[in-house]
Image (cartoon, rainbow, N blue to C red):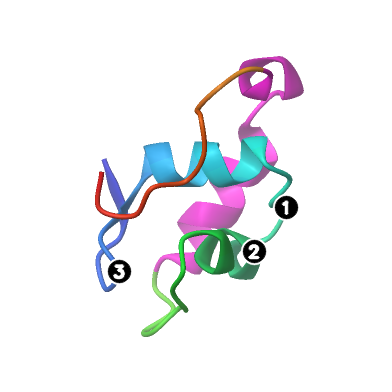
Amino acid sequence: MYVCLCNALTDHHVRDAASEGAKRPAEVHAACGCRAQCGSCVKAMLTMLRDLPATALSGYGQGVVRGA
């Protein structure tokens, strides 16, 4: 599911970034090599980051790859 339309970031990108330590939307964007543009994704991304259980992140993803 797309979370950030401006940068084509999906929920997988958010999970990958979170598994590498991102705790805020700005950190997710930085991990993906982009920046928030219109800001409409920030609320949804924050909700995702807060709702992701730590156990779901352990071992998830092999790094952030933009456009995957």
- Residue designated by label 3: 7
Q: Looking at the rendered structure, which numbered label has been put on residue 23? A: 1
Mark 1 neighbour class, 10 Å CA radius: few under 14, some 14 to 19, many 20 or more: some
Q: Is residue 31 magenta?
A: no
Q: In which quadrant is the C terminus drawn? A: top left
Q: Main secondary structure of the magenta part?
A: helix
- Residue under numbered circle 2: 27
42 relative to 9, above or below: below
Residue 31 lies in quadrant: bottom right
- The kind of residue tagged 3 is Asn
User: Given contact means CB atoms under 8 Å apart, are the residues at marks 2 and 1 in contact?
Assistant: yes
Point out the stretch of residues depicted in magenta.
41-58
Residue 44 in the magenta stretch? The answer is yes
- Which kind of residue does numbered mark 1 sit on? Lys
**Quadrant assignment, res 39:** bottom left
Q: Identify residue type, mark 2.
A: Glu
Across and down, in percent, residue 63 comes to: 52, 39
Q: Residues within 10 Å of mark 3 (few under 14, many from 20)?
A: some
Q: Position of residue 35 (x, y in %)?
A: 47, 79
Image position, residue 44 (x, y; %): 47, 54
